[in-house]
Image (spheres, rainbow, N blue to C red):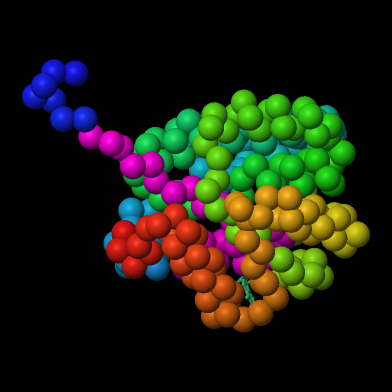
Protein backbone atom coordinates (compact mmCIF):
# COMPACT_ATOMS: atom_id res chain seq x y z
CA UNK A 1 0.00 0.00 0.00
CA UNK A 2 1.41 3.41 -0.95
CA UNK A 3 1.65 6.26 1.56
CA UNK A 4 -1.20 8.06 -0.17
CA UNK A 5 -3.60 5.13 0.00
CA UNK A 6 -5.87 5.05 3.02
CA UNK A 7 -6.75 1.65 4.42
CA UNK A 8 -10.47 1.50 5.07
CA UNK A 9 -11.69 -1.07 7.52
CA UNK A 10 -14.75 -2.76 6.07
CA UNK A 11 -17.57 -3.35 8.56
CA UNK A 12 -19.33 -6.68 8.17
CA UNK A 13 -23.11 -6.65 8.33
CA UNK A 14 -25.05 -8.49 11.02
CA UNK A 15 -26.33 -11.95 10.19
CA UNK A 16 -29.60 -12.75 11.98
CA UNK A 17 -31.55 -15.97 11.49
CA UNK A 18 -35.12 -16.92 12.43
CA UNK A 19 -35.76 -20.55 13.34
CA UNK A 20 -38.51 -22.72 14.80
CA UNK A 21 -41.37 -25.01 13.92
CA UNK A 22 -44.19 -24.70 11.41
CA UNK A 23 -46.47 -21.66 11.66
CA UNK A 24 -44.45 -20.13 14.49
CA UNK A 25 -44.73 -16.64 12.96
CA UNK A 26 -41.17 -16.34 11.63
CA UNK A 27 -42.11 -14.98 8.19
CA UNK A 28 -44.51 -12.46 9.72
CA UNK A 29 -42.00 -11.21 12.28
CA UNK A 30 -38.99 -11.14 9.94
CA UNK A 31 -40.86 -8.72 7.65
CA UNK A 32 -41.86 -6.56 10.62
CA UNK A 33 -38.26 -6.49 11.84
CA UNK A 34 -36.92 -5.60 8.38
CA UNK A 35 -39.31 -2.62 8.21
CA UNK A 36 -38.39 -1.55 11.73
CA UNK A 37 -34.64 -1.75 11.08
CA UNK A 38 -35.02 0.21 7.85
CA UNK A 39 -36.94 2.89 9.74
CA UNK A 40 -34.02 3.08 12.15
CA UNK A 41 -31.64 3.61 9.23
CA UNK A 42 -30.11 0.14 8.88
CA UNK A 43 -29.34 -1.38 5.47
CA UNK A 44 -31.25 -4.67 5.49
CA UNK A 45 -31.98 -7.54 3.15
CA UNK A 46 -34.39 -10.39 3.68
CA UNK A 47 -33.78 -13.90 2.46
CA UNK A 48 -35.18 -17.35 3.23
CA UNK A 49 -34.30 -21.01 3.12
CA UNK A 50 -34.71 -23.19 1.29
CA UNK A 51 -34.46 -20.48 -1.34
CA UNK A 52 -33.27 -16.90 -1.48
CA UNK A 53 -31.15 -17.10 -4.64
CA UNK A 54 -32.60 -18.22 -8.01
CA UNK A 55 -30.73 -21.55 -7.85
CA UNK A 56 -31.88 -22.25 -4.31
CA UNK A 57 -35.49 -21.33 -5.15
CA UNK A 58 -35.38 -24.02 -7.85
CA UNK A 59 -34.32 -26.57 -5.22
CA UNK A 60 -37.05 -25.32 -2.85
CA UNK A 61 -39.78 -26.76 -5.01
CA UNK A 62 -38.05 -30.14 -5.21
CA UNK A 63 -37.67 -30.52 -1.43
CA UNK A 64 -40.98 -29.02 -0.29
CA UNK A 65 -43.12 -30.87 -2.83
CA UNK A 66 -41.81 -34.14 -1.42
CA UNK A 67 -40.33 -35.14 -4.79
CA UNK A 68 -37.03 -36.07 -3.11
CA UNK A 69 -38.56 -37.89 -0.13
CA UNK A 70 -38.39 -41.33 -1.74
CA UNK A 71 -34.62 -40.97 -2.20
CA UNK A 72 -34.16 -40.71 1.58
CA UNK A 73 -33.25 -38.12 4.18
CA UNK A 74 -29.53 -38.07 3.25
CA UNK A 75 -30.49 -36.98 -0.26
CA UNK A 76 -32.82 -34.30 1.13
CA UNK A 77 -30.06 -33.06 3.46
CA UNK A 78 -27.68 -32.70 0.51
CA UNK A 79 -30.32 -30.79 -1.46
CA UNK A 80 -30.95 -28.36 1.43
CA UNK A 81 -27.18 -27.93 1.75
CA UNK A 82 -26.77 -27.26 -1.98
CA UNK A 83 -29.50 -24.63 -1.83
CA UNK A 84 -27.87 -23.07 1.24
CA UNK A 85 -24.50 -22.90 -0.48
CA UNK A 86 -26.03 -21.03 -3.42
CA UNK A 87 -27.87 -18.59 -1.14
CA UNK A 88 -24.69 -17.98 0.89
CA UNK A 89 -22.57 -17.37 -2.21
CA UNK A 90 -25.07 -15.33 -4.21
CA UNK A 91 -26.93 -13.35 -1.54
CA UNK A 92 -25.71 -13.66 2.06
CA UNK A 93 -21.93 -13.26 1.83
CA UNK A 94 -21.95 -10.37 -0.66
CA UNK A 95 -24.47 -8.49 1.51
CA UNK A 96 -22.55 -9.08 4.74
CA UNK A 97 -19.30 -8.00 3.09
CA UNK A 98 -21.10 -4.86 1.95
CA UNK A 99 -22.07 -4.04 5.56
CA UNK A 100 -25.72 -4.96 5.04
CA UNK A 101 -27.69 -6.70 7.79
CA UNK A 102 -29.03 -10.02 6.54
CA UNK A 103 -32.26 -11.44 7.99
CA UNK A 104 -32.70 -15.06 6.99
CA UNK A 105 -35.94 -17.04 7.47
CA UNK A 106 -34.47 -20.43 8.50
CA UNK A 107 -30.82 -21.44 8.03
CA UNK A 108 -28.45 -24.16 9.24
CA UNK A 109 -30.37 -24.96 12.46
CA UNK A 110 -33.34 -26.13 10.37
CA UNK A 111 -31.10 -28.76 8.76
CA UNK A 112 -29.73 -29.80 12.14
CA UNK A 113 -33.28 -30.28 13.43
CA UNK A 114 -35.37 -31.42 10.44
CA UNK A 115 -32.75 -33.60 8.74
CA UNK A 116 -30.72 -34.47 11.87
CA UNK A 117 -32.90 -34.77 14.98
CA UNK A 118 -36.04 -35.65 13.05
CA UNK A 119 -34.71 -37.23 9.83
CA UNK A 120 -31.95 -39.29 11.47
CA UNK A 121 -29.16 -38.06 9.17
CA UNK A 122 -25.73 -38.66 10.72
CA UNK A 123 -24.70 -35.65 12.82
CA UNK A 124 -21.06 -35.66 11.65
CA UNK A 125 -22.13 -35.77 8.01
CA UNK A 126 -24.53 -32.85 8.58
CA UNK A 127 -21.97 -30.74 10.44
CA UNK A 128 -19.32 -31.35 7.79
CA UNK A 129 -21.78 -30.16 5.12
CA UNK A 130 -22.76 -27.21 7.28
CA UNK A 131 -19.13 -26.10 7.60
CA UNK A 132 -18.54 -26.53 3.89
CA UNK A 133 -21.61 -24.73 2.58
CA UNK A 134 -21.83 -21.82 5.02
CA UNK A 135 -18.26 -20.79 4.12
CA UNK A 136 -17.78 -18.92 7.39
CA UNK A 137 -21.15 -17.12 7.12
CA UNK A 138 -22.28 -18.01 10.63
CA UNK A 139 -25.28 -16.28 12.23
CA UNK A 140 -24.45 -13.65 14.85
CA UNK A 141 -27.89 -13.95 16.38
CA UNK A 142 -30.54 -16.66 16.03
CA UNK A 143 -34.10 -16.14 17.23
CA UNK A 144 -35.77 -19.46 17.97
CA UNK A 145 -39.56 -19.15 17.80
CA UNK A 146 -41.05 -21.58 20.28
CA UNK A 147 -44.67 -22.68 20.53
CA UNK A 148 -46.65 -25.91 20.91
CA UNK A 149 -46.77 -27.70 17.52
CA UNK A 150 -50.57 -27.95 17.68
CA UNK A 151 -50.81 -24.15 17.72
CA UNK A 152 -48.22 -23.76 14.95
CA UNK A 153 -49.89 -26.26 12.64
CA UNK A 154 -53.28 -24.66 13.25
CA UNK A 155 -51.81 -21.27 12.26
CA UNK A 156 -49.93 -22.69 9.26
CA UNK A 157 -53.07 -24.43 7.96
CA UNK A 158 -54.68 -21.04 7.37
CA UNK A 159 -52.07 -20.24 4.72
CA UNK A 160 -51.65 -23.69 3.15
CA UNK A 161 -51.93 -23.68 -0.61
CA UNK A 162 -54.75 -25.53 -2.33
CA UNK A 163 -52.68 -28.71 -2.34
CA UNK A 164 -52.49 -28.73 1.48
CA UNK A 165 -49.48 -29.12 3.79
CA UNK A 166 -45.98 -29.52 2.34
CA UNK A 167 -43.62 -32.47 2.87
CA UNK A 168 -42.59 -31.36 6.39
CA UNK A 169 -45.84 -29.84 7.60
CA UNK A 170 -47.65 -33.11 6.96
CA UNK A 171 -45.74 -35.04 9.63
CA UNK A 172 -47.45 -35.90 12.92
CA UNK A 173 -47.45 -33.91 16.17
CA UNK A 174 -44.95 -36.29 17.81
CA UNK A 175 -42.42 -35.53 15.07
CA UNK A 176 -43.13 -31.79 15.31
CA UNK A 177 -42.59 -31.93 19.09
CA UNK A 178 -39.27 -33.71 18.54
CA UNK A 179 -38.24 -30.81 16.32
CA UNK A 180 -39.38 -28.29 18.91
CA UNK A 181 -37.13 -29.98 21.48
CA UNK A 182 -34.31 -30.05 18.92
CA UNK A 183 -34.47 -26.28 18.48
CA UNK A 184 -34.61 -25.75 22.26
CA UNK A 185 -31.51 -27.92 22.67
CA UNK A 186 -29.61 -25.78 20.16
CA UNK A 187 -30.63 -22.71 22.18
CA UNK A 188 -29.32 -24.33 25.38
CA UNK A 189 -26.09 -25.45 23.72
CA UNK A 190 -25.36 -22.09 22.08
CA UNK A 191 -26.70 -19.43 24.45
CA UNK A 192 -24.35 -16.73 23.10
CA UNK A 193 -25.94 -16.98 19.66
CA UNK A 194 -29.53 -18.04 20.37
CA UNK A 195 -32.51 -16.35 22.00
CA UNK A 196 -35.77 -18.23 22.50
CA UNK A 197 -38.84 -16.18 21.60
CA UNK A 198 -42.18 -17.21 23.12
CA UNK A 199 -44.20 -17.33 19.89
CA UNK A 200 -47.42 -18.40 21.62
CA UNK A 201 -48.61 -14.86 22.26
CA UNK A 202 -50.11 -11.99 20.28
CA UNK A 203 -48.35 -10.62 17.18
CA UNK A 204 -47.62 -7.40 19.05
CA UNK A 205 -46.08 -9.14 22.02
CA UNK A 206 -43.95 -11.38 19.79
CA UNK A 207 -42.73 -8.24 17.95
CA UNK A 208 -41.81 -6.72 21.32
CA UNK A 209 -39.84 -9.83 22.27
CA UNK A 210 -37.99 -9.72 18.92
CA UNK A 211 -37.21 -6.05 19.41
CA UNK A 212 -35.90 -6.70 22.93
CA UNK A 213 -33.61 -9.45 21.63
CA UNK A 214 -32.24 -7.12 18.94
CA UNK A 215 -31.65 -4.32 21.45
CA UNK A 216 -29.76 -6.70 23.72
CA UNK A 217 -27.65 -8.00 20.81
CA UNK A 218 -26.70 -4.49 19.69
CA UNK A 219 -25.96 -3.43 23.26
CA UNK A 220 -23.69 -6.46 23.82
CA UNK A 221 -21.92 -5.69 20.52
CA UNK A 222 -21.33 -2.10 21.68
CA UNK A 223 -23.42 -0.73 18.81
CA UNK A 224 -26.29 1.74 18.66
CA UNK A 225 -29.52 -0.03 17.67
CA UNK A 226 -31.36 3.23 17.10
CA UNK A 227 -28.86 4.54 14.54
CA UNK A 228 -28.17 2.17 11.70
N1 LIG B 1 -36.59 -27.20 6.09
C1 LIG B 1 -36.02 -25.99 5.84
C2 LIG B 1 -35.80 -28.33 6.32
O1 LIG B 1 -36.32 -29.42 6.48
N2 LIG B 1 -34.43 -28.18 6.34
C3 LIG B 1 -33.81 -26.98 6.10
O2 LIG B 1 -32.56 -26.90 6.14
C4 LIG B 1 -34.65 -25.84 5.85
C5 LIG B 1 -34.01 -24.50 5.60
C6 LIG B 1 -39.77 -24.66 4.77
C7 LIG B 1 -39.79 -26.11 5.19
O3 LIG B 1 -38.54 -26.71 4.91
C8 LIG B 1 -38.05 -27.33 6.06
C9 LIG B 1 -38.73 -26.65 7.22
C10 LIG B 1 -40.07 -26.27 6.67
O4 LIG B 1 -40.96 -27.34 6.87
P1 LIG B 1 -41.62 -22.87 4.58
O5 LIG B 1 -42.85 -22.78 3.76
O6 LIG B 1 -40.54 -21.89 4.31
O7 LIG B 1 -41.04 -24.32 4.43
O8 LIG B 1 -42.10 -23.07 6.07
P2 LIG B 1 -42.01 -22.28 7.37
O9 LIG B 1 -40.73 -21.55 7.51
O10 LIG B 1 -42.31 -23.27 8.43
O11 LIG B 1 -43.19 -21.24 7.18
P3 LIG B 1 -44.57 -21.17 7.86
O12 LIG B 1 -45.35 -20.18 7.08
O13 LIG B 1 -45.19 -22.51 8.11
O14 LIG B 1 -44.27 -20.62 9.29
P4 LIG B 1 -43.85 -19.21 9.80
O15 LIG B 1 -43.12 -18.43 8.80
O16 LIG B 1 -43.19 -19.46 11.10
O17 LIG B 1 -45.27 -18.52 10.12
P5 LIG B 1 -46.00 -17.28 9.42
O18 LIG B 1 -45.40 -16.02 9.85
O19 LIG B 1 -46.14 -17.57 7.97
O20 LIG B 1 -47.42 -17.40 10.14
C11 LIG B 1 -48.32 -18.44 9.85
C12 LIG B 1 -49.76 -17.94 10.10
O21 LIG B 1 -49.90 -17.61 11.47
C13 LIG B 1 -50.27 -16.25 11.65
C14 LIG B 1 -49.87 -15.54 10.36
O22 LIG B 1 -50.66 -14.40 10.12
C15 LIG B 1 -50.10 -16.64 9.32
O23 LIG B 1 -51.45 -16.67 8.96
N3 LIG B 1 -49.55 -15.75 12.82
C16 LIG B 1 -50.13 -15.57 14.02
N4 LIG B 1 -51.40 -15.76 14.46
C17 LIG B 1 -51.62 -15.49 15.78
N5 LIG B 1 -50.68 -15.03 16.66
C18 LIG B 1 -49.42 -14.82 16.26
N6 LIG B 1 -48.50 -14.38 17.12
C19 LIG B 1 -49.11 -15.09 14.88
N7 LIG B 1 -47.95 -15.02 14.16
C20 LIG B 1 -48.24 -15.42 12.91
The reply to whether the magenta stretch includes residue 12 is yes
Residue 196 visible? The answer is yes
Give the image location of residue 95, x and y in percent: 39, 41
Residue 165 visible? The answer is no
Query: Where does the magenta region start and end?
Result: 8-34
**Residue 144 occupies which quadrant of the picture?**
bottom right
User: Quarter of the image containing the C terminus?
Assistant: bottom left
Give the image location of residue 3, x and y in percent: 11, 21
Residue 114 shown left or right of residue 85 in the figure:
right
The reply to whether the magenta stretch includes residue 151 is no
Comparing 85 with 182, the one in front is 182
User: Quarter of the image containing the N terminus?
Assistant: top left
Residue 206 shown left or right of residue 220 in the figure:
right
Comparing 31 with 182, the one in front is 182
Q: How many numbered circles does the render carry?
A: 0
- Name the residue at the top extreme: 2
- Residue at position x 77%, y 46% from top? 114
Q: Does residue 166 sit above or below 58 in this rendering?
A: below
Q: Does residue 194 sit above or below 198 in this rendering?
A: above
Residue 14 shown left or right of residue 3 in the figure:
right
Give the image location of residue 179, x and y in percent: 80, 54
Comparing 219 with 146, the one in front is 219
Ligand 1 is located in which of the four quadrants? bottom right
Give the image location of residue 67, x and y in percent: 76, 37
- Residue at position x 55%, y 40% from top? 138
- Residue at position x 78%, y 54% from top? 185
Comparing 28 with 220, the one in front is 220
- Name the residue at the left extreme: 4
- Name the residue at the right extreme: 174
- Residue at position x 34%, y 67% from top? 226
Amino acid sequence: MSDTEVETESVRGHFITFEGGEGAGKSTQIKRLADHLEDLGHDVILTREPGGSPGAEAVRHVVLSGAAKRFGTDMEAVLFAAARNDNVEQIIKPALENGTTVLCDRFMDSSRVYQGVSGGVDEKFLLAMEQAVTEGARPDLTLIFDLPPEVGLQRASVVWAEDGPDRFESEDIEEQEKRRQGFLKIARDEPDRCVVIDANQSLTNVSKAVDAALRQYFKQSGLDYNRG
